[in-house]
Image (cartoon, helix red, strand yellow):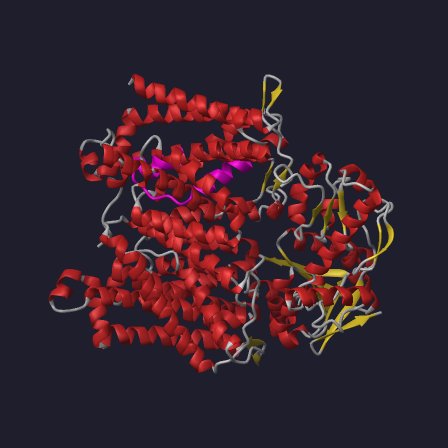
Amino acid sequence: MQLFLQMVMGGLTVGAVYALLGMGYSLIYRASGLLTFAQGEYFMLGAFVGLTFFVNMGLPFPLVLILTTAVMVAIGFLSEKVIITPLISRGSKPIHIVLATIGLAIFLQNLAMLVWGSRAFTMPTIFDDMPVFIGSVFIIPQNIAIVIAMLVLMGGLHLFMNKSRAGLMLRAAAQDRMAASIVGINVPLAIGLTWGISVGLAGLAGLLIAPVHGVHAHMGLLVGLKGFAAAVIGGYGSIYGAVIGGILVGLVETFTSGYISSNFKDVVVFAFLLLVLFLKPEGLIRSEQIDK
Amino acid sequence: MNSRLLVYALAIAAAALVPVFAGNDYIILICCLIGIYIIVNTGLDMVYGYSGQITLGQAGFYAIGAYTSALLSINTDIPVLLCVLIAGLLSSVIGMIVAFPAVKLVHHFLAMVTIGFGEIIRLLALNGGHFTGGVEGISNIPKPELFGFVFADVHSYFYLVLVLVVLLLWGKQNLVTSRIGRSFRAIRDNSGAASAFGINVHHTKVAAFTVEGFFGGVGGALYAHLVGFISPETFSLTQSVLFLTMVLLGGAGTFWGPIIGTILITILFELLQPFGQMQMAIYGLIIIGVMLFMPKGIMGMVNSRWGSRGAPAGQLAPSGRSH
Amino acid sequence: MVQVDNVQGIIGSMHSGNILAAGPTVEEAKIPLVGVGTSPTWLAQGFTYLFRSLSNSDQAVGQLAIYAKDSGLKKLAVFHSNDEYGNAGAKQFDVAAKAAGLEVASTQSFTHGDRDFTGQLGQIIATAPDAIFVWALGDDLGAVSKQIRQWGFQGPILGPEGYTQPMVIDFAGAAANGVVFASQYLVPKSVEEGSGALMQAFLKTYGEKYGAMPEADTSFRAYDATMILAEGMKKAGNTDGTAVRDAIANISGLEGIAGTFNFVDGKGEGIQSVRFYRIEDGKYVELK
């Protein structure tokens, strides 16, 4: 039982990261019907930007949080404007955009290696990373903080998208560009902002997990793919679906390594993804039913 | 028609002379690799260029071919060239099995399924213990042999690859102009209409993946016997992306496109070698640039400028975002 | 490289897997290679042009098993990376533990670069081991050590030379205390901390050239390897591959950073001794 509960805790922590990336995939999909393969690299970039502010410049953590988010939102906005908009305006097909984002991912990963180097860096912990025991089960405050941060961001995103004027604007632009621009919504700005938010979420995930995982240029690829798996398993396009999918992927991963073998945890995750796609391609949760 | 045959003959003759003028063995080795990549990309183009489906799992077939042929040739007495054929057939069957449920999906979902497939194959190779050699991979893979002649050095291996490239490209051209080839293009251009004309869309898509599997498997097997050593890192998603980039740069759905793209990208990689880390960063930018400025590839541009028969696939592959 | 640049000697690689892959080519081309990877595998293949400029990991593993026995540790668990280096270390430890009469209660592995070990460590802790033997490269060791301590395990961690890399202690902090490892050299933070005159001299030159201290022991390994190759060429009087090979195979009593090299009858192995260290309050303490 102790092992079981401990694995649930571990699964939740990694799951929270996949959920944050998955939310980004879903937002972008709703805004432009596209898939980006650069999410994993934005996650990596967020960790490096945070590291630079926190360690190299010695800024206080709350400021690091704000600055990193701002930088990542700006990068997301720019990526959309510099690469995606020109592609769409040339009438590119989805495969071309998918490949362009793969090109972007390759570029970002190697840029990070050129700028920061190819070794692993250590991010000091902000929360206590030594365990608190409850009975025989221990809880690491830092990991709990990551899960809570993910839930807070999910709630915040929900409020923003559903209750604020800006959110309404983004949703309208995503649903029907033509109609949105007729009623005076700046559609290009809205789409760019949605990319900004998605990239900001990925960057924040990178910053939050940095003290646990360390920071290095290769940290993004697999996490990016699993974040996508999270979004698809939960129901592509749904924010809550991404969260549920993320936690499911996290749990599948931890339980596989605990009860079967760590060697096969990624195989099982991808097999799980294929199974969901084959049997229930709309995902476990229908986006229409949950959060429109 | 005669002028076309002349072009083919000249191309083959030029390729056959490469080892004579190559300065050293390394250049011939690279040329062997180009030949192998052309085989792989020809198969890839059957799925992407001719039948209009996304695939990013080519490295998976490449790995299946390489591991099958390597393991068979080391552990059994089957002649190496037969191992290569068996590897291609096995990879082809696996392509068919995976495609059966997969091709119901389109766009990003199909992209993700093929990526998932490729990753699963790589991870199985990585964690296969003694069977696949784990992260160390397999070494001392024997060279092919025919009637007592061993293709031991890169010179003879180059001619072996060249013969296979010509054979397989000839096979591809026959397939493309056959009824099944026309079905490929029909489902790419308009699957609704194709289905109305009695084409079984699902089976046709599966057939395209089966062909892809065969070409990818043969390519992988030839790679294993050329280099003599394989390990899982060769068969990553990056490799699949590299293959697709070659096809897209050259021009998908054309005869010359995958060939030109393969040659250009391979040479480019060699030229970028001295730049170290910059090599991959520049490669990333090149992908973005190609997508932005020449999404139909070189052959697409040539065809639309000088108007040749056979519409480039670029215009006809699946279009429109999902909403 | 062998074909294009026509080299006359090769230093490296750090990664034993690369050396293993290059072995047949190098052997065929008759070019001596001084490798700096610690896996025993590539010298166990019978290649005659390959040499190693530091002790191989089998020696470190064997010494650690003896250390465990002498310290009264009986039940051990093994946690290793699932790659060439980790697998070889774990396999060798099994052999050494059996010879020393130790019980290996659980063996778990992880993929290089992974950062969540909940499942594997849960299994290990459930067997209540006296000590945990960890075998992986330096960039994984910080996270591994930290998570072992997070599970409440306070016993000794026995580990590889990767613990000399400063980033491990940076990452693990107090969690690294109680780690005992075998290594050829430490990575000092200043010239004065260098062990021995030769290392101090090397560090001084390195500092002047690059304006910083080395981050890993790679530069020591490379220095020793270069020196051995240079000595071989000097003794041979020319750069002919076979002559240099024979000259290196006759080197004995050559002082390097790792210690005294002796290649005579070593089947390519140049050094047999290894040093032991314990991490206490974030500092390395040599065990005699």
Instruction: Reply yes or no: does residue A13 show up in magenta.
Output: no
| C104 relative to B5, above or below | below
Residue A126 or residue C14, whichever sits in front: C14
| A6 relative to B34, above or below | below
Instruction: Reply yes or no: does residue B63 show up in magenta.
Output: yes
Residue B271: give x, y in percent of width and height.
49, 43
Can you tell which quarter of the image residue B138 is in?
top right
Instruction: Mark yes or no: residue B186 visible.
Output: no
Instruction: Mark yes or no: residue B237 visible.
Output: yes
Residue at the image point whose x is 60% and y is 70% from the top: C147
B260 lies left or right of A179: right
Most common SS among magenta residues: helix
| B19 relative to A70, above or below | above
Residue B174: give x, y in percent of width and height.
34, 23
How many numbered markers are drawn?
0
Residue at the image point whose x is 28% and y is 68% from the top: A193
Residue at the image point whose x is 36% and y is 48% from the top: B111
C195 lies left or right of A133: right
Residue B230 or residue B279, whichever sits in front: B279
B172 lies left or right of A135: left
Residue B158: give x, y in percent of width and height.
53, 27
Residue C54: give x, y in percent of width and height.
77, 55
Residue A229 or residue B318, whichever sits in front: B318
Can you tell which quarter of the image residue B252 is in?
top left
Q: Which residues are magenta?
A: B42-69
B46 lies left or right of A114: left
Q: Residue furthest left?
A: A182
In the rendered image, the quadrant that contains the N terminus of chain C is top right
